[in-house]
Image: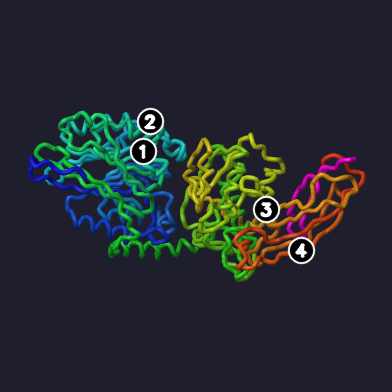
């Protein structure tokens, strides 16, 4: 903190509390404090300093959890009204349902008859949005007088907005350059008498490292840090869901003798209400000079904040109101989709599962159109699956699955992100299923969409485990490019899958994982129920012998693993048929025993093992394909064997 000069008389201390990317997280869960405690923190901060402005950098609504989502985010609007939010930048998710929905419902005054789901009491701002026609609903900036000091806020939304929402919903809306729009509006605010100007921008840093955040002046966020003029006293950011509190020198301030403060705060409060930005300005009300500024991020989870009773009541009512819609049947299941289990019946995130593969396939289906990236492959992280999807199966299958049940399976309301990856990058993603040393779990098996499968060698060295990959029966080439979808958590490198960040042409489709499931189940009624597919997508192949043999040799020997799903009731093979061409050469028993918990392998995906040992027909030469086929599931592994004569 820079100390106040002795000549300054009676400075005004102004507190700006910042937030971003709340995404309707009403209830506590893992590292999410819940809206009531979050509101209690804001109330406590206001009690410490009545000169407080509560401001946001966007994405308060959209991509929300079920209790808010099912009510068109009205509960989230209500809690921010209860917390007296002052102002927010427009985020891309505010436009998930289009420009008209934002201005005509969310921003419009509440009316029990004509607008029961709207009524945001705060001001949305975005200087870099040119609205369609003559519309002027979203202001570029907002000001507030605090004890004789005028504080101005400039809003801006990510320039990638057209890639992140449906084009139809923002037709006629033009997104302009953030830096240019900000500098123009900040200059006008200063000219009009603003003493302090803060940028609320729905764009953020790619990492939390303050030392490198401004290194690239051409990057999305580096251009903002380096390009925003000295008229802006602080930057409150969002969009990338990261928690950081940094300060950077401003070139024009360094040589300005009237400036006491030389560094500008650049902050973001992570996601889901887990943190709050706290910026404290000391301002000379006579001259408007900023005498001092400090910035820190407060951890709401670890803080001793009392839950706000009024906000808790809103949340409780939202949960109760969601019970009715939650019972609505979305579609029909032809069987139970289960997560993998360990020997004691507990969840095994290291095992391939019918549920993981199903959800991945749903997400590929939801983004199959070119407007969403034309997905060919999708991946699903096992930690994003919180319950099995079994439906109301008391009377057997087909069985209906409800809205609430679908939401309980995927409660995080992640959006679906599509990126382009080379085959080599996909191979690296799969290699990262073996987690870094010291991780909470040594292995995480990704769910994969239906047309994708691969082999791996569990005993190979790191970086060499993944064998052949196929898409619709065709070998995936390392130098070819493929369209891949994953949820926003995984696409951002979550669970140590950092290779996901290397994809190109990234687009956030704006669809939540839950909405994708809702849409998918809508086309799966009683006459076409969604039915589990028992074929494995990831199969272990470990050669015991050399795969180069002589005709008629009995030396072909290999171990296969990961041949069985382990969910209760999952269909499992008992035999594997070995075939070359149409000829069955032999059959081998499959051991489906789940490895004991005390064995480190229990965290992996090795259940369903067999030793394959056979001879190659004497009339075969060259490279022949050995097909291993399960007797019940139809799982198929193709293994190349090179047959060479002496």
Tell me which numbered mark, 1 or 3, is placed earlier along the sequence: 1
Q: Measured from the top left, where is residue 329 in percent x and y?
A: 54, 61
Label 1 or label 3, whichever lies nearer to me, is 3
Task: Find disc 2 in the rendering and name its residue.
Answer: 217
Tell me which numbered mark, 3 or 4, is placed earlier along the sequence: 3
Local SS, label 2? loop
Disc 1/disc 3 C-alpha distance (Å): 48 Å
For image coordinates 27% across by 35% down, the residue present is 249
Label 3 or label 4, whichever lies nearer to me, is 3
Q: Are marks 3 and 4 in contact (CB under 8 Å)?
A: no
Residue farthest toward the right in the current orientation of the protein: 619
Local SS, label 3? loop
Left or right of 193 in this view: 215? right
For image coordinates 12% across by 41% down, the residue present is 5
For image coordinates 36% across by 65% down, the residue present is 316
Q: Quadrant of the N terminus?
A: top left
Q: Are marks 1 and 3 in contact (CB under 8 Å)?
A: no
Tell me which numbered mark, 2 or 1, is placed earlier along the sequence: 1
Badge number at residue 574: 4
Q: Nearer the viewer, residue 61 or 572?
A: 572
Task: Find disc 3 in the rendering and name its residue.
Answer: 459
When the figure is inspected, residue 312 is found, relative to residue 237, above or below; the finding is: below
Local SS, label 1? strand
Q: Quadrant of the C terminus?
A: top right
> Does the image show residue 471?
yes
Disc 3/disc 4 C-alpha distance (Å): 24 Å
Badge number at residue 157: 1
Q: Measured from the top left, where is residue 339 in percent x and y?
A: 59, 61
């Amino acid at each position: 903190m820079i100390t106040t000069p002795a000549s300054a008389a009676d400075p005004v201390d102004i507190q700006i509390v910042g937030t971003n990317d709340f995404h309707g997280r009403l209830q506590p869960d893992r590292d999410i404090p819940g809206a009531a405690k979050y509101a209690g923190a804001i109330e406590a901060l206001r009690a410490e300093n009545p000169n407080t402005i509560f401001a946001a950098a966007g994405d308060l609504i959209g991509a929300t959890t079920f209790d808010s989502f099912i009510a068109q985010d009205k509960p989230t609007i209500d809690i921010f009204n209860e917390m007296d939010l002052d102002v927010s930048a427009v985020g891309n998710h505010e436009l998930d349902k289009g420009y008209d929905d934002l201005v005509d419902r969310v921003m419009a005054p509440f009316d029990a008859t004509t607008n029961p789901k709207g009524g945001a009491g705060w001001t949305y701002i975005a200087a870099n949005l040119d609205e369609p026609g003559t519309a002027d609903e979203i202001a570029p900036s907002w000001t507030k007088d605090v004890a004789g000091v005028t504080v101005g806020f400039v809003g801006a939304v990510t320039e990638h907005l057209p890639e992140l929402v449906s084009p139809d919903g923002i037709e006629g809306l033009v997104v302009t350059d953030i830096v240019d729009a900000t500098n123009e509006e900040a200059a006008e605010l200063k000219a009009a008498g603003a003493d302090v100007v803060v940028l609320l921008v729905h764009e953020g840093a790619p990492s939390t490292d303050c030392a490198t955040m401004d290194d690239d002046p051409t990057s999305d966020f580096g251009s903002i840090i380096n390009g925003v003029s000295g008229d802006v006293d602080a930057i409150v950011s969002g969009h990338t869901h990261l928690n950081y509190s940094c300060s950077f020198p401003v070139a024009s301030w360094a040589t300005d003798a009237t400036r006491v403060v030389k560094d500008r705060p650049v902050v973001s409060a992570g996601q889901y209400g887990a943190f709050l930005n706290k910026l404290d300005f000391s301002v000379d009300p006579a001259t408007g000079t900023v005498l001092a500024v400090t910035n820190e991020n407060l951890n709401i989870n670890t803080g001793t904040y009392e839950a706000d009773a009024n906000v808790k009541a809103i949340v409780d009512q939202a949960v109760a109101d969601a019970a009715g819609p939650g019972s609505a049947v979305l579609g029909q299941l032809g069987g139970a989709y289960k997560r993998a289990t360990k020997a004691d019946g507990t969840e095994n995130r290291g095992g391939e599962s019918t549920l993981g593969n199903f959800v991945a396939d749903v997400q590929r289906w939801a983004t199959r159109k070119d407007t969403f990236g034309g997905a060919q492959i999708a991946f699903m992280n096992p930690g994003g699956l919180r319950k099995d999807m079994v439906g109301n199966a008391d009377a057997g299958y087909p069985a209906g699955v409800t809205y609430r049940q679908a939401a309980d399976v995927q409660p995080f309301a992640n959006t679906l992100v599509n990126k382009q990856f080379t085959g080599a990058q996909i191979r690296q993603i799969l290699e990262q299923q073996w987690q870094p040393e010291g991780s909470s779990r040594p292995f995480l098996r990704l769910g994969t969409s239906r047309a994708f499968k691969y082999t791996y060698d569990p005993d190979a060295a790191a970086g060499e485990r993944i064998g052949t990959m196929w898409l619709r029966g065709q070998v995936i080439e390392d130098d070819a490019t493929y369209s891949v979808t994953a949820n926003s958590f995984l696409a951002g490198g979550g669970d140590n899958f950092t290779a996901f960040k290397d994809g190109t042409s990234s687009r956030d489709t704006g669809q939540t994982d839950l909405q994708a499931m809702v849409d998918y189940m809508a086309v799966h009624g009683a006459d076409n129920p969604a039915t589990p597919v028992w074929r494995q997508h990831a199969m272990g192949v470990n050669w015991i012998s050399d795969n180069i043999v002589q005709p008629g040799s009995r030396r072909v020997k290999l171990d296969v693993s990961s041949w069985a799903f382990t969910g209760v009731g999952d269909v499992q093979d008992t035999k594997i048929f070995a075939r070359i061409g149409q000829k069955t050469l032999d059959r081998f028993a499959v051991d489906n025993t789940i490895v004991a918990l005390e064995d480190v392998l229990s965290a992996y995906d090795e259940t369903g093992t067999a030793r394959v040992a056979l001879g190659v027909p004497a009339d075969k030469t060259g490279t022949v394909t050995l097909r291993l086929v399960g007797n019940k599931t139809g799982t198929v592994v193709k293994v190349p064997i090179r047959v060479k004569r002496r």
